[in-house]
Amino acid sequence: MTRKPKKILVPTPVSLIVRGEAGGKVVSFKTRPGGTKAFVEKGVKMPKGLSPREQVYWLKRIAHGSEYFIKPLSPKAKEIRSLLEKNGIIVEKAIQDLKNGTFLFKKTGNSLDSVNGIKLFIQNREKNIENVGRVIRKMHSLGITHNHLHLSNIAITNNGTVVLLDFKKARISKKTITIGEGIFQELLKTAKTITKLENHVKKLSKPEQQKREREILLQFLKNYPKEITLTP
């Protein structure tokens, strides 16, 4: 019986710095030095003739299809991840310290900017919005703000579990924090992020988007006290 040859996977940069213009048109982009690398099959090359926008989407598809990633992980991010895991919040799985400030990660769930992630989220939309809000509220109760919650950094598993990704901008406070400034802005940005996801499925007018953002924000806020007592 002939064995199939093993696929050779190579790390490929997928973190991008994108330059755009009004209307969302991608003008140019470059890979972010020291950013995330996704393992893809050796020999896979970007098709020729793609526009900058199409090239960005091609790289995103490459990242969504990868099972393993190399990402930088600072001591502060490690501390935050450990605290979240200890308190029952699921984060992407780090499987090996590469000893150079980076770790090897295994894919955990489907990010909300991927085809599978959008499909899973929309299947039980209101329940998933509730789950996202619960996870963020729990994170805030630990004194942690993520500061980078967009579609690529929230994932969902096949059974609906919410997974948080990428803590390089996260911060932790040792004192009581209030619903203002950072926390409110984080909730508002997450509401905008989810509205953006919903807009992929059903196009909304600008007033409809703004109304939906307010609805999701109020849903997030309804269970927040004015002050958050940090979990010991």
Image (cartoon, grey):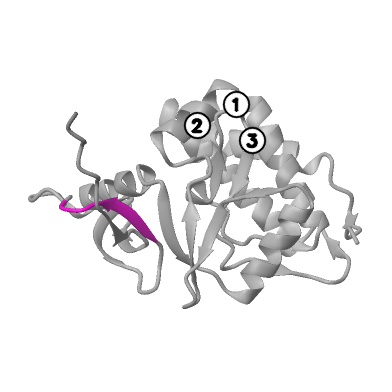
What residue is rendered at 43% in x and 32% in y? 116
Q: Secondary structure at mark 1?
A: helix
Between circles 2 and 1, the one closer to the viewer is 1
202 versus 181 height, above or below: above
Residue range corresponding to the magenta coloring = 37-43
Structural distance between the alpha carbons of marks 2 and 1: 9 Å
Secondary structure state at the residue bearing disc 2: helix
Q: Which residue is mark 2?
A: 198
Instruction: Give me the residue at 88% from left, 57% from top.
Output: 228
Residue at (55, 29) in percent of width and height: 158
In this rendering, would 28 be left or right of 201?
Answer: left
Asked which quadrant contains residue 220, the reply is top right
Q: Farthest residue toward the top?
A: 123
Q: Amino acid at mark 3?
A: Thr
Which residue corresponds to mark 3?
A: 161
State the image coordinates of residue 79 (x, y, percent, origin top left).
Answer: 70, 69
Q: Which residue is mark 1?
A: 125
Taking the magenta stretch, the answer to whether it contains residue 129 is no
Q: Position of residue 1 (x, y in %)?
A: 19, 28
Q: Earlier in the sequence, mark 3 or mark 2?
A: 3
The residue at the far left in this view is 49
The dot on residue 28 is none
Q: Main secondary structure of the magenta part?
A: strand
